[in-house]
Image: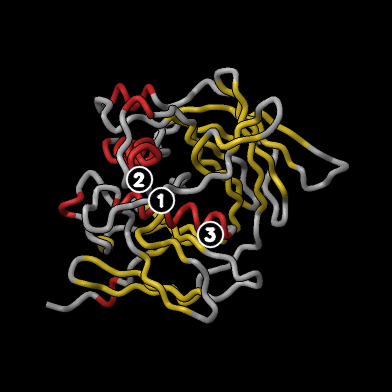
Amino acid sequence: MIAKIIYILITLLMFSSCLKEEYPDNAFEEQLVVEGSIEQDGVAKVMLSLNMQHSEKISEETLRNRIIRYAIVVVTDETDSENIQSEQLICRMDKKYPTQFVYMGATIIGKVGGKYRLDIYYSGRQWTATTTIPEPNRLYDVTTEIVGNMYRIKATIKPNADNLPYMVRCETSFTKEDEPYYLPPALFGIIENCEQETTITINRPLDYENIREYSTLFLIYEDVYIQFCTMSKFGYRYWSLWENCTLNSLNPVFPVDEEPPTNIVEVTENATTRGAAGIWQGYGVSYYRVVPNLNNLPKN
């Protein structure tokens, strides 16, 4: 629970405080923060919150108050111009998600090559974004290597036809009977592209709750669920800068001087303008469950 609160705290603060230049508190602009996705054979999922000032008092209550639970969220399938379909997502409580609440679809199922529009209505304002779902790729030769009482995961990735980037997400805190719903990005799991076959190491996501004991490796009793995502080049720009802000927002030597881009725009009477932060992204995905090869454990 605490780790998830810290995760959403970083997201809320990131769009206010990751820039190197400091601004007075009265320059703070409240913004909608969106993390939305749709993948092939899956429904739309959207988390909504409001950013917060870096000087604001941090508590579980103030963080909970920044999570938006009463917006109208609509996804429209625009793939076929002669058969456009829309559905309003339902907000439900789900502790597997960092915000504890997620807007989730039911009837519109993502398809490779499909085009999907997101519309958000909240507090008398409207925001919109569009995305498509790229062709998924897969991991090859997924292997485990025992390191003491932990293990390392390696995999091979190959180029895709459109030279699109990848993202690796993973999670361990699920039972074998409980398929994960939300998987956080693996540390250094944002991959711009690969022009040739490449071997990568899949790292554990950062554990903010136990950062002093954090290791990139996995414990030998943990099964690891992996989501390998093909995404747009915009998705790469967003997630790579998101990771940079997460790791270096307080780094005095290599400060972050650029915040992540957004494809969420506010609809006004005459135009659309940037009025929010975050991303609405279609992913081509493949899933894996990795079990360590305990036959390679060192013998006493």
User: Looking at the image, is mark 1 or mark 2 earlier in the sequence?
Assistant: 2
Q: Secondary structure at mark 3?
A: strand
Q: Amino acid at mark 2?
A: Leu
Q: Secondary structure at mark 2?
A: loop
Work out how far the residue at label 1 is from the one at label 2, CA to CA, in angstroms: 6 Å
Q: Point out residue 270 in the picture as x, y percentages from the top left corner.
A: 71, 29
The structure residue drawn at horizontal position 33% and vertical position 52%, both measured from the top left corner, is: 256
* Quadrant, the N terminus: top left
- Which image quadrant is residue 13 in? top left
User: Looking at the image, is mark 3 or mark 2 earlier in the sequence?
Assistant: 2
The structure residue drawn at horizontal position 48% and vertical position 62%, both measured from the top left corner, is: 288
Work out how far the residue at label 3 is from the one at label 2, CA to CA, in angstroms: 28 Å
Foreground disc of the pair 3, 2: 2
Q: Is residue 139 above or below residue 49?
A: below
Mark carried by residue 229: 3
User: Looking at the image, is mark 3 or mark 1 earlier in the sequence?
Assistant: 3
Mark carried by residue 258: 1
The structure residue drawn at horizontal position 62% and vertical position 27%, both measured from the top left corner, is: 126
* Quadrant, the C terminus: bottom left
Mark carried by residue 19: 2
Foreground disc of the pair 3, 1: 1
Q: Taking 79 as reference, is 68 left or right? A: left
In the foreground, 184 or 236: 236
Q: Taking 79 as reference, is 285 left or right? A: left
Q: Amino acid at mark 3?
A: Cys
Q: Point out residue 266 in the picture as x, y percentages from the top left corner.
A: 60, 32
Residue reaching furthest top?
A: 124
Q: Point out residue 138 in the picture as x, y percentages from the top left corner.
A: 55, 68
